[in-house]
Image: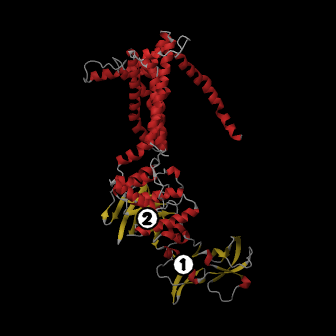
């Protein structure tokens, strides 16, 4: 009997999430199959997946999210490795610097990127000034601009997650591997990297889901280039097509769940433990 | 012939020298322990031999070749860590096979050698387990197997038993000694546990503040400590600072505050400090003392403590305070009682 009391502790959280998350999400998804409160109807989904405009946006969103995730991992990994091996004092300083960008809102940061990569922005002025290019580069209002903005947004998160995992790797494991004959590259590939997999997976999920659902950055830096979240917003607010908006929301939820499941399966394969 | 030699080595950490002009030489097939209090430099010495640390000065010669600059992964030394350092993401088999895979040994041969070494450490049947599913003793045996399987030229142990409970510690050290002797691998063993070191070693080096105070076989260290530090470290709790000593026909006569004590002949030291263990002193009540006691001084009992098997007394005499263990004690001595303390000639060791 006593054992049941501990479940009381999670009751408030479970109730809150059920009422304000699970139920609304469930209702949204269910409602997409009943456009006219009549019999179930999946023709909307079918026509959507034949619509090349939608498919192009879905593909762009996936591509931007995946590229953002990969770039964050590639840039974040060495930085995190460096930070994790610093002394405690230095580590604190570097971690504060890392999370510093999080203190400004995504809106402010998107506007500053406009100044930097715009037609007459810093980057184009500089490149033309030293004569590398004649015409200004079209970066702003392209998927590239969105990726730049999202990487800026999510890199701190990646680094913090990875530092946490790397700190928990005992340094003796690395010396042990070396004493058994492993070169620096061998130690990294056989010991460091596999032990970082949990961090890479958690960081990867955070960045992917964050990029996949981000609104502000693509809305401000993407220009005419829509992604799923801006398309959803357009349907709901501009076109007042709440049914289509719900369908888009349902698709985003399903894609997110599929990606999380795949990454977890991958993690178990790469890092078995027990 | 010595297998390896550390020559005038200096290691410093943040400008503080841990080892200064350090010398050590170990023979082929020997098990040598480095023993000392924490901070004496024993682990530093071991890590230097392993190649985890670089020395600022000095040379490390191995089989007459200069190994000073040879990196860790080219040394072929087996290292067993205090916290085992097993790879948590690999099975027991993969942990042990790690070194062989680095050496590009063929698959069939790897399997053969891993199973054979797991048999040596009595872990057959555990190949597919992950380290998380092993007890401390089993982890340590995997760590030993992992170091042995590469057929190392030198085996290094860094306090390998300190995380195990007392019973297991005794079993494991017997095991380590058995394996070491069976395979004849030269071994350097670091510990702060005196009993552990004495029981498994061919030679023990007692270290203090970055220098070796004495390097001998355990029995010699136990009977003939060279310095006051060594004597104190291995349980000579009583020290007498003599004023002078002179050679007599059958031994040494040492004088302190006008009282002369006779000491058995000792040729290897000119020291003026006499050391004696609490167990070797004899205590008599003043009125019950035999008439002809050699090396006797009078005194008083300060504190008596009951230790179960014996009584321990703190006594004050004219030549200083002594701690005495007395297991005879039919009638224990009371605090404040006048006593005669006998300091047996054969048990006094003169140290530097």
Left or right of A258 in this view: A141:
left
Residue drawn at x 52%, y 69% as measured from the top left: B229
Please tell me in which quadrant of the rendered image residue B115 appears: bottom left
- What colouring method underlies this structural image? secondary structure
Percent x, y for residue A1? 71, 40
Using the image, name the chain to which the residue with label 1 belongs: B
Element on which disc 1 rests: strand
| CA neighbours of label 2 inside 10 A, class few (<14), some (14 to 19), many (20+) | many
In the image, A159 versus B227, the foreground residue is A159
Q: Which residue reaches farthest bottom?
A: B249
Using the image, name the chain to which the residue with label 2 belongs: B
Please tell me in which quadrant of the rendered image residue A50 appears: top left
Q: Is residue B337 above or below residue A112?
A: below
In the image, A83 versus B184, the foreground residue is B184
**Number of numbered markers:** 2
Residue drawn at x 35%, y 58% as measured from the top left: B75
Percent x, y for residue B349? 54, 78
Label number found at residue B349: 1
In the image, A82 versus B169, the foreground residue is B169
Element on which disc 2 rests: strand
Q: What quarter of the picture does the N terminus of chain B occupy?
A: bottom left
Percent x, y for residue B128? 46, 51
Marks 1 and 2, Cα distance to the nearest angstrom? 29 Å
Q: Earlier in the sequence, mark 1 or mark 2?
A: 2
Q: Which residue bears the numbered disc 2?
A: B188
Left or right of B24 in this view: B305:
right
Q: Which residue reaches farthest front?
A: A39
């Amino acid at each position: 009997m006593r054992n049941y009391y501990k479940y009381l502790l999670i009751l408030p959280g479970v109730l809150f999430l059920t009422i304000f998350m699970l139920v609304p999400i469930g209702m949204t998804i269910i409602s997409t199959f009943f456009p006219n409160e009549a019999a179930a109807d999946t023709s909307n989904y079918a026509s959507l997946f034949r619509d090349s405009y939608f498919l192009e946006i879905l593909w762009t969103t996936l591509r931007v999210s995946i590229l953002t995730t990969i770039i964050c991992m590639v840039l974040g990994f060495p930085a995190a490795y460096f930070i994790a091996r610093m002394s405690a004092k230095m580590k604190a300083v570097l971690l504060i610097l890392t999370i510093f960008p999080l203190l400004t809102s995504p809106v402010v940061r998107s506007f500053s990127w406009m100044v930097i990569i715009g037609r007459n922005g810093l980057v184009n002025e500089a490149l033309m000034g030293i004569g590398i290019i004649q015409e200004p580069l079209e970066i702003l209002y392209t998927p590239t601009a969105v990726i730049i903005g999202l990487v800026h947004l999510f890199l701190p998160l990646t680094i913090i997650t990875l530092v946490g995992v790397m700190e928990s790797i005992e340094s003796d494991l690395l010396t042990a591997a070396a004493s058994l004959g492993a070169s620096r590259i061998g130690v990294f590939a056989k010991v460091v990297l596999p032990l970082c997999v949990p961090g890479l997976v958690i960081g990867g999920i955070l960045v992917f889901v964050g990029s996949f659902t981000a609104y502000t950055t693509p809305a401000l830096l993407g220009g005419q280039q829509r992604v799923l979240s801006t398309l959803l917003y357009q349907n709901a607010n501009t076109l007042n097509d709440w049914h289509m908006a719900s369908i888009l929301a349902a698709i985003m939820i399903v894609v997110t769940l599929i990606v999380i499941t795949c990454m977890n399966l991958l993690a178990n394969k790469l890092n078995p433990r027990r | 012939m010595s297998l390896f030699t550390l020559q005038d080595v200096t290691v410093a950490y943040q400008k503080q020298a841990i080892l200064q002009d350090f010398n050590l030489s170990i023979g082929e097939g020997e098990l040598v322990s480095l023993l000392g209090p924490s901070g004496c430099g024993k682990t530093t010495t071991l890590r230097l031999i392993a190649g985890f640390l670089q020395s600022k000065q000095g040379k490390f010669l191995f089989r007459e070749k200069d190994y000073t600059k040879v990196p860790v992964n080219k040394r072929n030394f087996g290292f067993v860590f205090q916290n085992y350092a097993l790879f948590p993401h690999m099975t027991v088999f993969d942990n042990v096979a790690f070194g062989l895979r680095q050496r590009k040994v063929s698959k069939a041969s790897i399997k053969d050698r891993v199973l054979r070494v797991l048999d040596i450490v009595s872990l057959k049947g555990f190949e597919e387990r992950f380290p998380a599913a092993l007890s401390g003793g089993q982890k340590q045996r995997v760590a030993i197997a992992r170091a042995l399987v590469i057929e190392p030229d030198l085996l290094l142990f860094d306090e390998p038993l300190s995380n195990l409970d007392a019973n297991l510690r005794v079993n494991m050290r017997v095991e380590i000694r058995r394996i070491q002797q069976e395979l004849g691998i030269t071994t350097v063993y670091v510990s702060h546990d005196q009993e552990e070191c004495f029981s498994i070693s061919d030679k023990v080096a007692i270290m203090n503040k970055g220098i070796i105070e004495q390097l001998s076989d355990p029995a010699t260290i136990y009977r003939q400590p060279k310095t006051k530090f060594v004597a104190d470290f291995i349980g000579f709790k009583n020290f007498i600072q003599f004023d002078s000593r002179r050679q007599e026909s059958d031994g040494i006569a040492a004088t302190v505050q006008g009282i002369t004590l006779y000491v058995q002949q000792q040729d290897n030291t000119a020291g003026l400090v006499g050391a004696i263990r609490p167990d070797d002193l004899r205590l008599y009540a003043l009125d019950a003392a035999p008439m002809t006691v050699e090396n006797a001084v009078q005194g008083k009992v300060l504190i008596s403590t009951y230790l179960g098997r014996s009584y321990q007394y703190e006594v004050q005499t004219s030549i200083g305070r002594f701690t005495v263990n007395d297991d005879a004690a039919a009638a224990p001595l009371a605090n404040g009682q006048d006593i005669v303390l006998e300091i047996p000639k054969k048990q006094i060791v003169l140290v530097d």
